[in-house]
Image (spheres, rainbow, N blue to C red):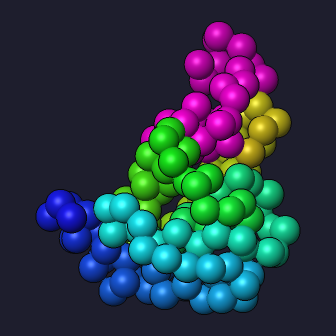
């Protein structure tokens, strides 16, 4: 594992985001296994919230799908979210993310298109569309 992934792994344990992710995985009856780059994959997550193909809390990537789903662009997208938890000092990331969803809804009516965290994690890698702002070219675009 690269040094930066090890640092992220330690930060996300210390800031309690990875322990929370593991608790969510247990509550959702997901099967947890070690993944790439210090991530933990939680497959078979059974709670229907949030509505997403996958989501990340700390270094834990959760999905309702079976093993083999977390690959390629989607895995790179979720890996970027794990790094965001490390730099947002853990649990405050949850509050900041919800605020970013509200802003995105206000700007374009979609929870991810103008969400700063989704944009920084690369919208397309996460399977999200790029909706224009309600204000067109003169506004935020």
- Could you say which is closer to the camera, residue 26 or residue 8? 26
Q: Is residue 117 above or below residue 97?
A: above
Q: Quadrant of residue 83?
A: bottom left
- Quadrant housing the C terminus: top right
- Could you say which is closer to the camera, residue 58 or residue 108? 58
Residue drawn at 72 percent across, 71 percent down: 44
Residue 125 on the magenta span: yes
Percent coordinates x, y for residue 23 in the rendering: 60, 89
Residue drawn at 78 percent across, 38 percent down: 110
Residue 133 on the magenta span: yes
- Quadrant housing the N terminus: bottom left
Residue drawn at 67 percent across, 36 percent down: 128
Percent coordinates x, y for residue 131 in the rendering: 72, 25
User: Magenta segment range?
Assistant: 112-141
Q: Is residue 101 above or below residue 11?
A: above
Residue that protrudes farthest toward the top in the picture: 137
Q: Is residue 83 left or right of residue 19?
A: left
- Mark count: 0
Q: Is residue 22 above or below residue 115?
A: below
- Could you say which is closer to the camera, residue 54 or residue 137? 54
């Amino acid at each position: 594992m690269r040094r930066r992934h090890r640092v992220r792994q330690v930060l996300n344990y210390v800031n309690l985001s990875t322990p929370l992710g593991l608790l969510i995985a247990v509550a959702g009856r997901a099967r947890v296994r070690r993944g790439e780059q210090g991530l933990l994959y939680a497959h078979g997550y059974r709670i229907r919230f949030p509505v997403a193909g996958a989501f990340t809390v700390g270094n834990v990537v959760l999905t309702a799908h079976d093993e083999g789903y977390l690959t390629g662009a989607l895995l790179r997208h979720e890996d970027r979210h794990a790094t965001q938890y490390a730099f947002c000092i853990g649990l405050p990331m949850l509050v900041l993310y919800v605020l970013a969803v509200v802003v995105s809804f206000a700007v374009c009516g979609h929870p991810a298109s103008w969400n700063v965290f989704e944009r920084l994690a690369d919208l397309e890698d996460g399977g999200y569309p790029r909706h224009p702002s309600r204000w067109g070219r003169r506004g935020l675009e």
